[in-house]
Amino acid sequence: MSTFLLEIGLEEMPAHLVTSSEAQLIARTTEFLSEHRLSVGHIQPYSTPRRLAVELIDISSESEALSEEKRGPSIERAKDDNGNWSKAAQGFARGQGMAPENFEERDGYVWLIKHTPGVSAADILANIGEEVIAQMKFTTYMKWANNAFLYVRPIRWIVALLDEKVIDFNILDVKTGRMTRGHRFLSNEHITIANAGAYVATLKAAYVIVDAATRKGIIQSQLEDIANQNNWLLDLSSDAAQNLLEEVNNIVEWPTAFSGGFENKYLELPDEVLMTSMREHQRFFYVTNQENDLLPHFLSVRNGNSEHLDNVIAGNEKVLVARLEDAEFFYQEDKQKTIDDSMTKVKKLVFHEKIGTVYEHMQRVGRLAASLADELQFDETQKADLARASEIYKFDLMTGMVGEFDELQGIMGEHYAQLFGESVAVASAIREHYMPVFANGNIAETAVGAVLAIADKLDTIVTFFSADLIPSGSNDPYGLRRAANGVVRTLQNKHWHVALRSLLSDFVKSNGEVTENADLTAIMTFILDRVRKLALDGDVRPDIVAAGTALTPDVDVVYIVDRTQTLANHADDDNFRDIIEALTRVSRLAMKQPAEGLVDESLFENQTEQALFIATQKINLAALESQGGDAVYSALAELQKPIADYFDMTMVNADNESVKNNRYLQLHMIDKLISALGDLEQIVIK
């Protein structure tokens, strides 16, 4: 068994692309090996800002030989009247790259056994440049020199070693070899790799830790050591801290952690300002004392060793203090203004040129939020808080602090609102209306904040759809999918049953030109697409998702989520198949003939009709839906036996037209109940 090393040397990649590019390289390499039937014991990825690499350990010396049996035409068609091979037989043989003399005759057909011999690993791996490296896709591209070829960053070198042997190929004018590059400042630029297995050790000697997981472990350990030595608390468990750790890991090759500080006076700034300045702008980790109060210190990582570290610390402190000086200036300036001052400017701020201003958006949101509050039976205090929050919730966009630190919108709104005398409920709603900020982010905790968040997102979706600014493919420049995801997750989190179509129908009618072109069916489908994605991400079967998330006359997200999960929970029940088959049989027959009116019991001709009618009459759908999907499923499951008995004894298409029509009326009555579980026809019965 051999080891193969592939290293793609690049100009420094953006930190956020390194991990995903490494994963893509592994996926494409795995697919490449599978397609060429070349087995490997283990695939080890490596990455730094300047390289993507993969090590194939225990790779076979050649691909697996393949024998395939191919059946051709029948013997009657394969031979003419004189016993010679027909054109059909000759064409079949030619298509397989063989001759008719290789035919075997059995089971009434001619057969060819096609042997594909193994190919040496070296010959296969010579294609990895064209089939893997050149095929990689990125969200950011560069071109260099006069080349038409695009890549995440210019390729500067390629290492391709099968044990000690160089595998020859090239990308543009970059030819493979055994020369890599060490740390840009701590090592010689050109380093020779003797054999594939020596890769990690060779680069470590050149001050490059190529294993991303190892490098991250070193960084975390160094940071924690400094924090412990100073009795500081360093929290690396949050999503934000983990994201920062990943980012820092992807900008260094030889990490050395250090600490710095700033004057106590800057601690008078809101904590979020300090944290944002350190984490988002400088890639610093903040620290706290044992009471969780921010300290005037930070931790960071340099790409190098500990030499001249004092100069590095001083430089980083200088840059941070400059940011904090700006923040302090804007903070003091903002405190001299009022909410009304900012709202005067908001009235001129454009939301979108096709839609109007931010202030007009806020007014629509206020009306929609009030409708939601009525439906959710908010008390008068909640309604008053919601109305006030709706009037001012975008004011902080016009503050100096948010102008400088746009990540703080909503956060500074809450802080300033309380500073200017607004209630805690109003201030919290201003911050929470942005939530969830990202796909799996936190949901608004307060009811007022959650309603404002839903209304803000729904108005955005409706108005952009009305202006024909609809996401297509992966393109979603206005974040409408994120907005729909936020609506779904917030409704689900609060367990609020809201009739979305009715709510938005009234909203569309009451807002004139800005909403008049909104296609409500398209919007409902768009929102349900987010329900489907969340269900699929939760490992619910695709057919169950399709059934449970079928479009309903009035979309209640919470109930649709619930019934989808109910179907998923029962999919492995012993009687699930029988229940679904019985219910879908009713639905399929009901579709064959429309029917309106009431069922006439006097037209029943057998006991099974009466028994099914009685069982159906017991089902109070409205009451069951209020209890959840499981209550509806359990009630409909009870119909399985009466339905089976009914079809054993009853011919729906009776000769008597009145009897036939009455039977279709009964089927339609049952089908309306069944539709409460979704489109059960989508379920694949196993």
Image: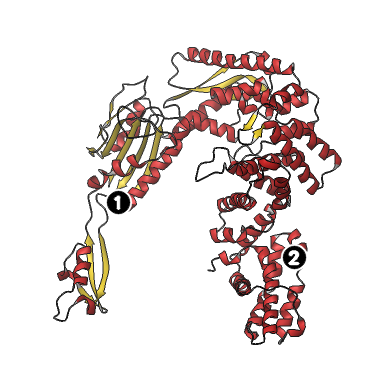
Q: State the count of labels.
A: 2
> In the rendering, at what x and y percent does residue 94 appear?
19, 64
Residue drawn where x is 86% and y is 40% of the image: 380
Residue drawn where x is 63% and y is 53% of the image: 521
In the image, residue 300 above or below residue 566: above
Looking at the image, the residue that sits furthest to the front is 513
Q: Amino acid at mark 2?
A: Leu
Q: Nearer the viewer, mark 2 or mark 1?
A: 2
In the image, residue 435 above or below residue 543: above
In-image side of 663 versus 538 (left or right): right
Q: Amino acid at mark 1?
A: Leu
Q: Earlier in the sequence, mark 2 or mark 1?
A: 1
Look at mark 1 in the image and give the residue it sits on.
Answer: 38
**Alpha-carbon distance for marks 2 and 1?**
58 Å
Report the disc number at residue 451: none
Query: Looking at the rendering, which quadrant does residue 634 occupy?
Result: bottom right
> In the rendering, at what x and y percent does residue 371 appear?
77, 45
Look at mark 2 in the image and give the residue it sits on.
Answer: 621
Query: Looking at the rendering, which quadrant does residue 464 occupy?
Result: top right
Residue drawn where x is 66% and y is 38% of the image: 435
